[in-house]
Image: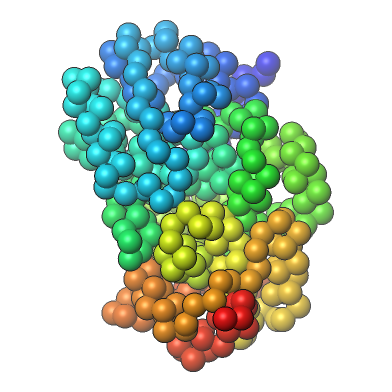
Amino acid sequence: MTSPLENTVQVAAGDSRYDILIQPGLLATPAAWAGLPKSAQAVIVSNPTIAPLYEAALRRALAPHHAQISTVLLPDGEVHKDWVTLNLIFDHLLAHGCDRKTVLYALGGGVIGDMTGFAAASFMRGVPFVQVPTTLLAQVDSSVGGKTAINHPRGKNMIGAFYQPARVVCDLATLATLPPRELSAGLAEVIKYGPIADMAFLDWIEAQLPALMARDPAALAHAVRRSCEIKAHVVGQDERESGLRAILNFGHTFGHAIEAGLGYGQWLHGEAVGCGMVMAASLSAELGGVDAAFAQRLHRIIAAAGLPTQAPHMPAEQWLALMRLDKKASAGEIRFVVIDRPGSAAVRPAPDALVAQVIQRHSLPA
């Protein structure tokens, strides 16, 4: 077993500095857990799907570092990413007499990571936490960068905080238990990095999609590492999404509208983002940033990854109303992440009429 430090991406965001460790077997590698904040208590936050698979291994890894380790299980799924579920974490922390040194460990996918991070940011005005992502989507996106949130019925991730983890531990072996649908959802966030930042990476993804779908260890390791490198670079320049970081939301304005419009959990986040990227690429072509061939190529890649490419039917007025709640919107004007040239993205407004045309073109019939 090689040192986890041999496959590490460093994040420098504001005053925070931390490592993303990426390789198989990290749950059982003592060096992966060395040097984290010291505390008498640790709390693992997970769900009933993930805990039976990995909680015991995480407890063994943490035992030398914490005298007491407890676990709180949250109901599984995006539909539970709300105040009621968040309070289960606070209830547990208070019931167990946790203090400002208590370390939280987020063991699971993006929902667990977001909620644990928000709880850590809020409890006693801030306690340390560690991301232990077990899904591809969480490893390449949501666990990195310190965005933590819960959903509101009218908008996704509208209530939260920027709060960086002490470390991100990506044990690639956990991807072996990922259901195929979840794997495809994670690939959406991998694909995203190509059009916005690195066309050579998009070329690699296109060529390696069969290997990624087959969970080839070397292909997954490269996909996770390169994705984290790009995100770390962007977050390092704009921790609080005041400018550049918004490009990481390519496809998300359309995607979040799908999630909120259908009801959280009907589509996985990555499925909505995949379809949203098809729509955002089409809008980019309409605005002259890329040609139709580029948009069609991205459509093919997303479809080949097993992701939906046609949005559910919703009236255009509902789409527009939901997208006006997007965090990039300003004074009621919807702003979209578009590709202004292959490998480069920008945030632009677009006329409602043009957006409505794109929606109609890429939606299922009523």
Q: Say above or below: 230 vs 322.
A: above
Q: Nearer the viewer, residue 121 or 231?
A: 121
Total marks shown come to 0
- Quadrant location, the N terminus: top right
Would you say residue 282 is visible in this rendering? Answer: yes
Give the residue at x 52% y 43%: 138
For residue 256, say whether it is visible: no
Residue 208: give x, y in percent of width and height. Answer: 79, 49
For image coordinates 66% across by 68% down, the residue present is: 309
Which of the 4 quarters of the picture holds residue 244?
Answer: bottom left
With respect to residue 164, does 355 lie above or below?
Answer: below
Report the colour scheme. rainbow
Quarter of the image where one finds residue 294: bottom right
Q: Which part of the image, by quadrant, shows the C terminus?
A: bottom right
- What's the residue at 33%, 66% (across, down)? 154
Residue extending farthest bottom: 353
Residue 166 drawn at (x, y percent): 39, 31
Whether residue 197 sits left or right of residue 248 in the image: it is right
Position above or below: 274 against 342: above
Where is residue 24? Give x, y as percent.
Answer: 65, 26
Q: Horizontal and vertical percent for residue 313?
A: 54, 76
Q: Is 333 drawn above or below residue 89 in the view shown?
A: below
Tell whether 277 sits left or right of 162. right
Residue at 28% of width from left, 13% of height from top? Answer: 40
